[in-house]
Structure formats: structure tokens, C-alpha cells
Amino acid sequence: MARVALITGGMGGLGEAICMKMEKLGYKVITTYSPNNHKAGEWLSNMRQQGHDFGAYECDVTDFDSCHACVAKIQKEVGAVDVLVNNAGITRDMTFKKMTKADWDAVMNTNLDSVFNMTKQVMEGMTERKWGRIINVASVNGQKGAFGQTNYSAAKAGMHGFTKALALEVAKHGVTVNTISPGYIGTKMVTQIPAEILESKILPQIPISRLGKPEEVAGLVAYLASDEAAFLTGANISINGGQHMY
């Protein structure tokens, strides 16, 4: 029976690439979309026209009860979740001086609280079945910080603290918990940055001298979800073209 992989925030960008990679490897792929995503149906239709058979469930990842209801529905209609990729995230970039409590809360709720909200729904089943994978998508800016991103950097750094602590708790139950920290990846959001900014400010920071490809990050996620990665847990794997080494 195919394993079930649940990817939050899978509609577009990096999440979409992860969905495609996991499906190609034989997983039954499920993604979530926020209640205010009015293009979810269009995305799903486009994916199916391209031959992809993704499941999609509405879920407010910032709300614990919404996550509980969503995963319960997935388990009833599709099956138990074997792989959870906590990929949902937003930015509200500005200097700390200008940042409001609402800006802080929005990013922390979506990027960090969601990791608890979703993982809580699947962890007990994983430990009971003695197999599971939790993969948390953080960021290079959670490792090195970034101007104008105190909220985002704090949330992404917090994700890895969560990873390390939970990895210790569940290691003996056959469940691994890992973080990946991508650098600048050539998603639609990043490629919309003005070319002069990319050429003068961003690419010079990257020794490989290019943006990463979503497919490259998806390949890392696929490895961490595999049986071959059973001895790897509590790690934060940088995939940033050499932009930040530590």
C-alpha cells in the first residue's frame, strides 16, 4: 500500500515541487490550502489536467481545531499520514521598528505554531505504527538572520528547536524528525524580485552563483522521507548553494 504524504502549503512554489516529487516516487500525496485561497480549485484542476492525482483539503494551519478536523478527514478518506512536510509559511518583512504585534503574530502563527498544530495530529499514529517522517521546512534566514525579518527568522529558528527536541522523544519509535533550511530558491516569489536586485545583491552571496531549483529541494525532502534516511534525525540540512556555512 502506498504511503501517504501530507504537505502543507503545497499549492505553488516549493510545495508544488515537493508534491510532484513525492507522487513520482509512489506516495499518495495530500496538500492543504488556506480557507482564503480562492484559487485552490483552479490549481487542483490544472494539476489533474497535467496527470497529477493530488488530494487537497482546506485547513487553517494556524488553528489547532482546524488542523484536527482536517487530518481526521484525511485519515478517514485516504488513510493514516506517514510523512508530514510542514511547508506552509508567510512573510511580513519590515524593520523591527515598523513591525506591529499583528505582523509578528501572523508570521509566528503560520510558520511556527502550525508545526505544532499539524504534527500533534499525526505523531501518535506514527509512533504506534513504529514508522513516520516529520520534515520541517525552515530557511537559511533562520540560521543567519536577515535584515527586516525578525519575525520570520525567529519562527524558522524555532522550527529547528522543535525538531531537535521532538526527535529525541520519538527516535526509539521509528519516527524521524528533521529540518531543511533552503536558501534562495527559484520560485515564482523569488523570481519576481527585480533582476538588478538579484544580480547585485542576492547572487553575489551564493558561491554557486545561481538560485536553487525547487526540484533540488524536493529531492532532499524525498530522501528524508525514505527508508534509507532512517538513521538521520534531529538534523538541520542546509541547501543554500554555499550561502551560509556553519
Image (cartoon, rainbow, N blue to C red):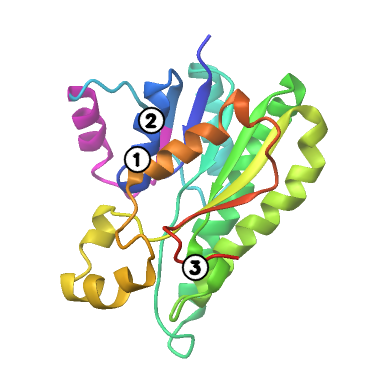
Vertical comparison of 198 with 95: above or below: above
Q: Which residue is found at the position 41% from the left and 34% from the top?
A: 31
Measured as percent of width and height from the top left, residue 200 is found at 25, 77
Measured as percent of width and height from the top left, residue 86 is found at 52, 45
Q: Which residue is found at the position 63% from the left and 45% from the top?
A: 178
Q: Residue type at mark 2: give it.
A: Lys
Q: Is residue 201 visible?
A: yes
The first of marks 3 and 1 along the sequence is: 3
Vertical comparison of 77 with 189: above or below: above
Furthest residue in direction top, as rendered: 1
Could you say which quadrant of the image residue 190 lies in?
bottom left
Measured as percent of width and height from the top left, residue 12 is found at 30, 44
Q: Which residue is mark 3?
A: 141
Residue 215, numbered label:
1
Residue 21, numbered label:
2
Assess whether mark 1 and mark 2 are in contact (beta carbons under 8 angstroms). Answer: yes
Q: CA distance from mark 3 to mark 1?
A: 20 Å
Bounds of the magenta segment: 31-49
**Dot 2 crowding, Cα within 10 Å, few <14, some 14–19, many 20+:** many
Vertical comparison of 210 with 31: above or below: below
Q: Is residue 82 left or right of residue 89?
A: right
The first of marks 2 and 1 along the sequence is: 2
Measured as percent of width and height from the top left, residue 2 is found at 50, 14
Q: Residue type at mark 3: give it.
A: Asn
Closer-to-camera residue (165/227)? 227
Q: Which residue is found at the position 44% from the left and 58% from the top?
A: 240
Q: CA distance from mark 2 to mark 1?
A: 8 Å
Secondary structure under badge 2? helix
Q: Is residue 24 left or right of residue 181?
A: left
Closer-to-camera residue (216/15)? 216
The first of marks 3 and 2 along the sequence is: 2
